[in-house]
Amino acid sequence: MKTKGSQFIGNSLFSRLDKEATPDDEMAKFMGEGRAAEKGLDPLAVDPTQMRRGVVVELEHTSDRHVAGKIALDHLAEYKNYYTALDTMELLLEDGIDPREWDPRTRLKQVNENPGP
């Protein structure tokens, strides 16, 4: 099955994202629909580090890099640091901390009061 707009995406897009961390015009053409388009997000204005991380994360759910990129861009349209926040949440959960109850100011105070060895 061919994703709508995939004719604009070549292997060069993802090799550029991996090497140069710069979305290109082909990505902009492909991303013409979805949440990012509804919000008027310019794909060229997205933080390339967030976009790269997003593609990696979304490839857990699809084997199509084009679809993964589109999903990532839609998430970034909602929250520009979506994948940093996701990584933080996962680290907290691994430590048994409920992210909804975590306050970084409290944690900093604990560290300052008990600096350790």
Image (spheres, rainbow, N blue to C red):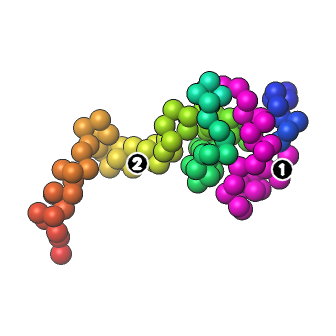
Nearest the eye: 93 or 14: 14
Q: Is the residue under label 2 in contact with that under label 1 (CB below 8 Å)?
A: no
Nearest the eye: 90 or 80: 80
SS at mark 1? helix
Relative horizontal placement of residue 16, taking residue 50 as reference (left or right): right
Image height of 115 relative to 109, above or below: below
Q: Is residue 59 visible in this depiction of the protein?
A: no
SS at mark 2? helix
Image height of 34 relative to 14, above or below: above
Which residue occupies 21% across, 51% down? Answer: 105
Q: Where is residue 44 shown, x and y percent of the image?
A: 67, 45
Work out which quarter of the rendered image holds the C terminus and state it: bottom left
Relative horizontal placement of residue 93, taking residue 51 as reference (left or right): left
Residue 17 falls within the magenta-colored stretch? yes
Which residue occupies 18% across, 50% down? Answer: 106
Mark earlier in primary sequence (1, 2): 1
Question: Is disc 1 surrounded by few (<14), some (14 to 19) or many (20+) residues within 10 Å?
Answer: few
Q: Which mark is residue 88?
A: 2
Q: Which mark is residue 11?
A: 1
Residue numbers of the magenta segment: 10-34
Q: Where is residue 76 shown, x and y percent of the image?
A: 55, 38
How many labels were placed on the picture?
2
The amino acid pointed to by label 2 is Thr
The amino acid pointed to by label 1 is Asn
Res 19 → quadrant: bottom right
Work out which quarter of the rendered image holds the N terminus and state it: top right
